[in-house]
Image (cartoon, grey):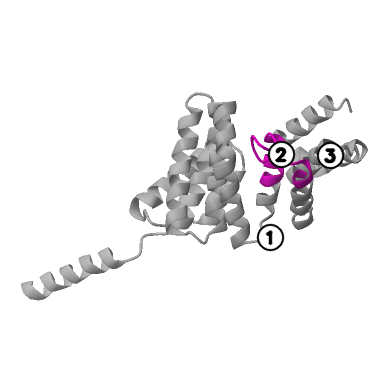
Amino acid sequence: MPKKLGLHLAVLLVLALLAAPVQAVDYAEVDALIVSKDLAKIQRAVELLEEHLAAQPDDGEALWLAGKAYLYLGDRTEEGRLQVFEKGKEYADRAVELVPNSPDAHYWLSALIGRIGQTRGILSSLFMVRPMKDALDRVLELDPNYAPAYWVLSQLYQQAPGFPLSIGNKKLALENAQRAVELAPDELEFQLQLARALDHNGQKEEGRKLLQEIRANPKLEEDPDLLKEVEEQAAEWKL
């Protein structure tokens, strides 16, 4: 083969390799690692996402998934938890910039804002309520059937102080919990919040009945974290 032809082919091969798309991350696989709630699997999800984002820094979906991964990681981190949540928020902020019409991006931004507020303390948590609610309102503008947003809004309305300090509102806490369960009736976390909202609104018998139904659901055994939370609530209500 003539030298010039060989050189020409080599150049074409290099150009073809440069032009080839970078292997995309499998979003479903990564999300499954995150929601497993297993620390090692969450750490693996973070590694996969950061490797991918090093090559494709403007991948909006990978960015909000990274925010989600860091939230799950922070929930299972003792030392440096605030820094983990803040790192996640950086990814979520970037996702909102790049994919402003993604309800997922806004939802995980709101969740990370909340975690940062909780970690910093009561006063910071109070100041985080408004930006958190703004992000959730944006989620519902983009997707009125985004059940997790109603679930978190219910918690905000229930836990925040009322007017004039903040947005606390018993009625809205209940309405949002009911809407979340209506949209996703099999989500036990949403049912637990509905039970709490019923109790918060003076409907104690209904709330306790629902909590007992949750405890009897075989699916609860699949989520040790939620099982612990349900049992703690049952103990508080002396059930």
Return the residue at label 1. Answer: 145
Q: Position of residue 237 (x, y in %)?
A: 85, 28
Question: Marks 3 and 2, Cα distance to the nearest angstrom?
Answer: 28 Å
Return the residue at label 3. Answer: 201
Q: Is residue 171 magenta?
A: yes
Q: Position of residue 238 (x, y in %)?
A: 88, 25
Does label 3 or label 2 sit earlier along the sequence?
3
Q: Which residues are magenta?
A: 152-173
Does label 3 or label 1 sit earlier along the sequence?
1
Dot 3 surroundings within 10 Å: few (below 14), some, or many (20 or more)? some
Q: Position of residue 228 (x, y in %)?
A: 74, 30
Dot 2 surroundings within 10 Å: few (below 14), some, or many (20 or more)? few
Q: Secondary structure at mark 3?
A: loop
Q: Give, as a three-letter code, the residue at label 3.
A: Asn
The quadrant the N terminus occupies is: bottom left
Question: Marks 2 and 1, Cα distance to the nearest angstrom?
Answer: 25 Å
Q: Give, as a three-letter code, the residue at label 2.
A: Asp
The disc placed on residue 223 is 2
Q: Residue at x 50, y 36 (%)?
A: 85
Above or below, 1 against 128 in this view is below
Say if mark 3 contacts mark 2, CB within 8 Å: no
Q: Secondary structure at mark 1?
A: loop
Q: Residue at x 71, y 39 (%)?
A: 223
